[in-house]
Image (cartoon, helix red, strand yellow):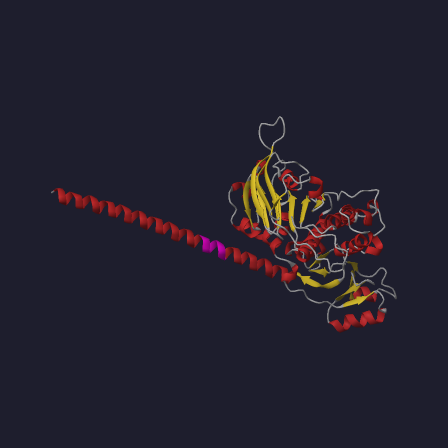
Amino acid sequence: MPTPAPDEGDGARAATGATIRLENLTKRYPGSSEPAVDSVNMEINAGELVVFVGPSGCGKSTTLKMINRLIEPSGGRIRIGGEDVTHMDPVKLRRKIGYAIQSSGLFPHMTVAQNIGLVPKMVGWSKARTAERVEEMLDLVGLDPGEFHGRYPRQLSGGQQQRVGVARALAADPPVLLMDEPFGAVDPITRDHLQDELIRLQHELHKTIVFVTHDFDEAIKLGDRIAVLRERSHIAQFDTPEAILTNPADDFVSGFVGAGAALKRLNLTRVRDVEITDYPTVTVDDPLQEIFNRVRASGTNEILLLDRRGRPYKWLRRGDLMRARGSLARAGTLVNDTVTRDATLRDALEAVLTDNAGRVVVTGRRGEYTGVVDMETLMNSVHELLEADRLEAMENQHELEEARGEQTRQAQEGVGGAAGGAGGGGEERA
């Protein structure tokens, strides 16, 4: 199984993903008449993010945990990067596979730095290399190393804990990352941002990620491919989100897709794929008169106020500035929600509708302002998706009618041929 050596030099190459192959993977528990997981066969490509989704109790988490042998298989094989790891020392195997779970699973008595550096330390990295990696990972997940290095988990928000959990899972640079409902215990807004962060990380790192969720919308948003699982982890459909949304394999899969498949496709398009416009901005350090002049010069009725780190803070209207009386402390409306470039159009549309202002601010990895997406842009994208679905449905219907016509023609020719043959035989007999 390919994994990077604990190279002390600055030129250590980051590990990319490894293929995962499950061959007749089975789990039976004593006393149970049926297996919990029954002969799963699956190949996950290197660098691919695959999501397991299915009803509670279908065996998706059990299947995931057998990959790193937290649960020992009763039968079958697991191959990672071509190597059979079914009988490998499970402790050594787990040190080569990242693992992130719900509620982060951080050790409460360890600092953030100690949590992240745990696996590199266990696999023999030097203190200097481990410390460097901790700083690198905090920066990678969007947390200021200077601010969070010495904190304890109890001093972090739920979203920050999950970011540290992902950083710890990736610290030893494993080719494979397993994620068992990692964002299930946080609020919806934080969950959206964590999903966006994972998408951004995957664009940079190209790990092989297996992700378990019960939320089909999350599966659509994150997955390169989705495995919809029935009971005992039987695969109902294993395909791209687009294919599952447009051509569900059966009624069971259709039940997961649910109503509004066209609108669910908004989860397949990212904010970075549409027009992000610039907007007039000022900072909290700008003099009030200069801010007022900027509003008048911009030709708009409002302007975006940024804090000292360049992050969106408030929307200021002309009337707010007239009433400011020398201070912006009580002026304007706080920016309640933002999206990143990796957010989906559905996230952006929800933010626009929640804010009821016709636009949403787009931010970078540290929350800095990068632009604005407005309602008109989002609605144009919705109309384009609906029109594409309409045309595809018409094309499918046309192909179906042609196929039926061809079947009818062949049937008629067959009947005609049979009748002709019967007639010819009669003449011979006569």
Residue 85 is inside the magenta segment = no
> Between residues 71 and 141, which one lies in front from this camera angle?
71
Q: Quadrant of residue 230?
A: top right
Which x, y percent locates residue 321?
82, 66
Magenta residues (range): 391-396
Whether residue 421 sits left or right of residue 149 in the image: it is: left
Q: How many marks?
A: 0
Q: Residue furthest left?
A: 430
Residue 393 is inside the magenta segment = yes
- The residue sitting at 13% across, 42% down in the picture is 429
Q: Residue furthest right?
A: 326
Report the magenta stretch's main SS: helix
Which x, y percent locates residue 120?
77, 49
Vertical placement of residue 336 versus 186, above or below: below
Which x, y percent locates residue 340?
70, 58
Which x, y percent locates residue 312?
77, 61
Vertical placement of residue 96 versus 277, above or below: above
Q: Is residue 258 visible?
A: no
Whether residue 254 sits left or right of residue 311 in the image: it is: left
Vertical placement of residue 98 versus 142, above or below: above
> Between residues 201 and 84, which one lies in front from this camera angle?
84
Whether residue 11 sits left or right of residue 396 in the image: it is: right
Whether residue 66 sits left or right of residue 7 in the image: it is: left
- The residue sitting at 78% across, 44% down in the picture is 106
Q: Quadrant of residue 333?
A: bottom right
Quadrant position of the C terminus in the picture: top left
Q: Is residue 288 visible?
A: yes
